[in-house]
Image: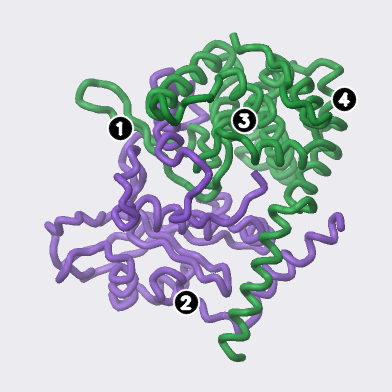
Amino acid sequence: MGFIGLLPPILNVIRKMYCKPCNSNIGEMTEVTIPHTYKLLEKKSKDTAWINAALKGMKVLSEGNTVTAVTLKPFGPSAGYYSELALMTLTYSMPNDPLSPPTDTIVKFLPIGFDKRLILDLVDLPKTECIMYYHLLRNHSEHELPPLPIMSPKILYADYCPATNNALMIMEKINFTLGDQKKAPDLDQAKAQMLCLAKVHAYYWGDKHPMVSLPPSPL
Amino acid sequence: MNTRVVRTCTWLTCKWQNKLLTGPDNPICLIAALKMKMNIKKLLKMVKEQNNYEPSDAYKKALTTTFPDGFFKMLQWCNTSPYKTVVHGDARIDNVFFKTLEDGSLEAGLFDWAQAMVAPAFYEMSWAVSHSFTTKFHEEHGDDLLRIYWDSLMQLLGPQKASGLEYSEFLKGYAMAECVSVSKCVIAFESIQKDTKADDYPHKRGLVCNGIENSLKTMEKLDAIGAMEAILGGGATAKVAPLG
């Protein structure tokens, strides 16, 4: 079949992007509409209705806690190569919520531009990231698994729409030191990186992961 | 349009796409192999100019023949690996963050899980080790770092799960996976060449060159050609030299 095999997935991606009747844009996991661009989220952030519905769907707030105010600031168009980022600050009615939801968050949108979006959609990257954050980093207790033994940003919202491939993620803004390939390598950091990967791999060892349901990959 | 019809169409097209991703006409394999054949020479030229490094003639040739031609068979071989787990998929140091603990030691965490998948652990490690560090650092510490990873993994898995897992076999997969890393570098190379006047072009070019040099040196050291030929010839074991 050769490269003709690329046509169906490409057409599928285009259909999902532009086919209006399919464009329900309802999130698979929270059943809340996904404001998948900065402009859409800005509109939804004029009041707290959307963010409260989204966070309720994610079950990340304690009973009685709600978001009372939202501020959204762009990161700039080139902040991420395969994503657009924004800063979102949330104010809660219960500042001492035992689930300690983060106040400073990063919003991750899909990239602008057809070519980037096509690459992402062909290999289901946004869906994968949402699934990983939603099921593995937040919901271990539902699968009777102990928590993942490594740090990862706390997720507030991660959802995608299978009909349109649109996705959106809201996660904790990390205040720790970020690894940086531009800087001179640090042996202690490299060792910590190796140990961290060993922990992740040992935790998920084996190829049967019914709770993960990751999209198929060539490997 | 009826929602049920839309859902059925979506399900069918997704199944089609999924079948392609895992079938013998996998478009990702085809693209990776084709791009490798087309652009590896240009990439190696850039590495020669930037890092004054070039692989041996045998590897230059294999990068346009043996490796891209055997790409899919190699992935099938990876699929039968006993080293499978959920991998992050892009565990370069740029996607890692660090917290200093009270005793002064560092604890690492991961973000940006978009490339997560069920894959052999050596696929993760080849990309993480060869594409996080400078060539000097990789040469000095790469083997030790991989050994630290392996020892920690074996300890965490415990004797029952670790039974039958061999470092020498893991290294064979590691050498194979460097071939996938090279193909990812080729795609990154194409991407950065689109805008050579960008402010961050020299930096990105440096990262690609370091990554490819690290990958190719590892492939040569571990006899990736021998391992690949054994897989293509249906050989059960390929002789791979131990690291260090």
Identify the residue at image location x=77%, y=42%: B72
Q: Which residue is mark 1?
A: B99
- Label 1 near label 4: C-beta < 8 Å? no
Above or below residue B171? Residue B188 is below
Q: Mark 4 and mark 2, same subunit?
A: no
Cβ–Cβ under 8 Å for marks 2 and 3: no
- Are tags 2 and 1 found on a single chain? no
Let me know if residue A32 appears in the view. Answer: yes
Secondary structure found at label 4:
helix
Chain of the residue where label 4 is placed in the rendered structure: B
**Where does the image place residue A11, in percent across and percent down from the top left?**
74, 70
Classify 10 Å Cα crowding around label 3: few (below 14), some (14-19), many (20 and above).
Answer: many
Labels 2, 3: one chain: no
Residue position marked by numbered label 2 in the rendering: A26
In this rendered view, identify the residue nearer to me: B31 or A142. A142
- B108 shown above or below A130: above
Residue ID at (38%, 61%):
A73
Q: How many angstroms separate mark 2 from mark 3 (CA)? A: 39 Å
Observer-side mark, 2 or 1, equals 2
Name the residue rendered at 68%, 75% in the picture.
A15
Chain in purple colour: A
Closer to the camera, B239 or B88?
B239
Q: Which residue is mark 3?
A: B207
So how many labels did they put on this image?
4
Q: Earlier in the sequence, mark 3 or mark 1?
A: 1
In the image, what residue occupies the spot 32% across and 48% down?
A145
Frontmost of labels 3 and 1 is 1
* Contact (Cβ within 8 Å) of mark 3 with mark 1: no
Residue B61: assigned label: 4
**How far apart, in angstroms, are the residues tagged by discs 2 and 1?**
37 Å
Question: What's the chain of the residue with tag 3?
Answer: B
Viewer-side residue, B69 vs B163: B163
